Amino acid sequence: MADFNVGFVIFPNITQLDFTGPFEVLSRLATPPSI
């Protein structure tokens, strides 16, 4: 599988949770299926 880069745009009033949620989802996409 090819590597890909993900970027986040920073706006005023952005919190850490705005990055953590998408990061958790995207980090699991590259893992092989588990049984």
Image (spheres, rainbow, N blue to C red):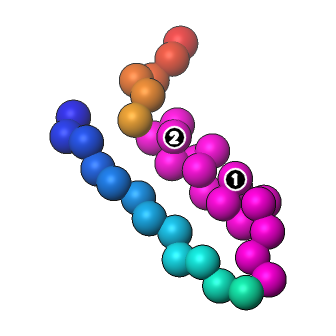
Closer-to-camera residue (1/14): 14
Label 2 neighbour load within 10 Å: few <14, some 14-19, many 20+: few
Picture coordinates of residue 26, whole percent (x, y)? 51, 48
Q: Residue at x 45, y 41 (%)?
A: 29
Q: Residue at x 60, y 78 (%)?
A: 10
Local SS, label 2? helix
Label 1 neighbour load within 10 Å: few <14, some 14-19, many 20+: few
Quarter-of-image position of residue 30: top left
From the viewer's perspective, is residue 4 above or below residue 33? below
Picture coordinates of residue 15, whole percent (x, y)? 79, 69
- Which mark identifies residue 35? none
Amino acid type, callout 1: Thr
Local SS, label 1? helix
Quarter-of-image position of residue 1: top left
Q: Is residue 19 left or right of residue 27?
A: right
Label count reads 2
Q: CA distance from mark 2 to mark 1?
A: 10 Å
| Residue behind mark 2 | 27
Principal SS element in the magenta part?
Answer: helix
Q: Give the residues in magenta.
A: 13-29
Q: Residue at x 80, y 83 (%)?
A: 13
Q: Is residue 29 left or right of residue 16?
A: left
| Residue behind mark 1 | 20
Q: Is residue 14 left or right of residue 22?
A: right
Closer-to-camera residue (19/33): 19
From the viewer's perspective, is residue 18 above or below residue 2? below
Q: Is residue 8 magenta?
A: no
Picture coordinates of residue 18, whole percent (x, y)? 72, 66
Answer whether labels 2 and 1 touch (C-beta < 8 Å).
no
- The answer to which of marks 2 and 1 sits earlier in the sequence is 1
